[in-house]
């Protein structure tokens, strides 16, 4: 991709207002794209209606604009992309990569080894057992290692069969899974550089496998440290993270840059702040860790 113009993106889920952790991810992806004279896109990952908050998508966009985070082109909404996801599933089905699964999440959890994440044991891989009804659609993964060079976290990856297992592409409720949607949309938007939180680091190898299965190129990855509260929990709606306010935008953005290890601009306006922040952006200064503290 060395000859391709940089195209980055920020892809929030509209489950609530933008909080400090989400702002850090937005700023990191914005600066990384702009520092290389690239495009920066925004995509709403609104594929899970039960978790979404009415009005949150518009609120997030207003907040980004208030902080001077201006995107290129139109905002993409995953809720309007179902036809593209169905087409990709059909393609994978024709290539015999998929199979129906009749297992519930509770059954899979019950077979998990204590202290380890539940990996699907392949119960339905060779056909639905007697009495089972198809619920979800899974993709067969081979017993291979997939590694990649993260621009901050270094070389990382996992064994698909042992640490990922056959993962879901369409859920039991009929909704398309995150792995499928993000891979399809990154390809559709010609994204060259994915900058996101390190909580998604382990999602990358399965997504690279899916890119390969669909014949897509693999973007570069940069996983930023995730902001955690005093209890060590990731900031989120579930941990009652407060929304960010643009009332003191420069001070708040300065806190973001500090946690990203960047030089603080000496700026009196947002425009000056961004000019300096873009000029001074250095990936090598980002902490090589999965977490940073909120305060």
Image: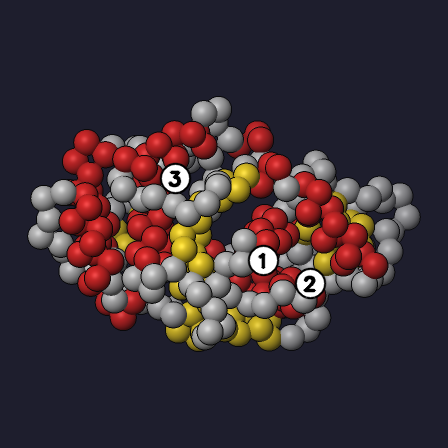
The answer to whether any part of residue 163 appears in the image is no
Q: Is residue 31 above or below residue 3?
A: above
Residue 295 - label: none
Q: Mark 2 near mark 1, Cβ–Cβ under 8 Å? A: yes
Which quadrant of the figure has residue 143?
bottom right
Q: Which is nearer the N-term, disc 2 or disc 1? A: 1
Q: Which is nearer the N-term, disc 2 or disc 3? A: 2
User: What coloring was used for the rendering?
Assistant: secondary structure
Question: In this rendering, would 84 be left or right of 208?
Answer: right
The CA distance from mark 2 to mark 1 is 10 Å
Front in this rendered view, residue 244 or 37? 37
Q: In this view, does 188 lie above or below 83?
A: below
Mark 1 lies on residue: 187
The answer to whether any part of residue 46 appears in the image is yes
The CA distance from mark 1 to mark 3 is 27 Å
Q: Mark 1 near mark 3, Cβ–Cβ under 8 Å? A: no
The CA distance from mark 2 to mark 3 is 32 Å
Mark 3 lies on residue: 236
Disc 1, SS:
helix
At a point 58% along the width and 31% down the height, the residue shown is: 49
Q: Is residue 270 above or below residue 118?
A: above
Badge 1, how many Cα within 10 Å: few under 14, some, many 20+? some
Disc 2, SS:
loop
Residue 75 is situated, as x and y percent measured from the top left of the image, at: 48, 41
């Amino acid at each position: 991709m060395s000859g391709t113009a940089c195209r980055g993106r920020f892809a929030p889920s509209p489950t609530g207002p933008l909080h400090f952790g989400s702002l850090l991810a937005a700023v990191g992806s914005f600066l990384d794209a702009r520092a290389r004279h690239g495009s920066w896109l925004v995509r709403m990952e609104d594929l899970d209606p039960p978790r979404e908050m009415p009005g949150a998508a518009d609120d997030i966009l207003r907040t980004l604009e208030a902080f001077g985070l201006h995107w290129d082109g139109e905002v993409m909404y995953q809720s309007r992309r179902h036809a593209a996801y169905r087409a990709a599933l059909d393609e994978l089905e024709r290539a015999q990569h998929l199979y129906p699964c009749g297992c519930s999440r509770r059954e899979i959890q019950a077979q998990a080894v204590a202290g380890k994440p539940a990996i699907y044991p392949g119960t339905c891989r060779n056909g639905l057992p007697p009495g089972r009804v198809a619920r979800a659609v899974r993709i067969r993964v081979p017993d291979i290692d997939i590694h990649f060079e993260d621009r901050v976290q270094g070389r990382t990856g996992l064994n698909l069969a042992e640490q990922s297992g056959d993962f879901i592409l369409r859920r039991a409720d009929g909704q398309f899974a995150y792995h499928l949607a993000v891979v399809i949309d990154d390809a559709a938007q010609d994204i060259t550089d994915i900058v996101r939180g390190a909580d998604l680091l382990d999602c990358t190898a399965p997504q690279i496998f899916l890119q390969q299965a669909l014949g897509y190129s693999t973007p570069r990855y940069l996983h930023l440290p995730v902001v955690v509260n005093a209890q060590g929990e990731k900031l989120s709606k579930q941990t009652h993270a407060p929304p960010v306010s643009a009332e003191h935008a420069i001070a708040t953005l300065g806190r973001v840059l500090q946690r990203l290890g960047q030089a603080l601009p000496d700026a009196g306006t947002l425009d000056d702040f961004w000019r300096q922040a873009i000029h001074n952006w250095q990936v090598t200064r980002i902490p090589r860790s999965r977490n940073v503290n909120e305060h």
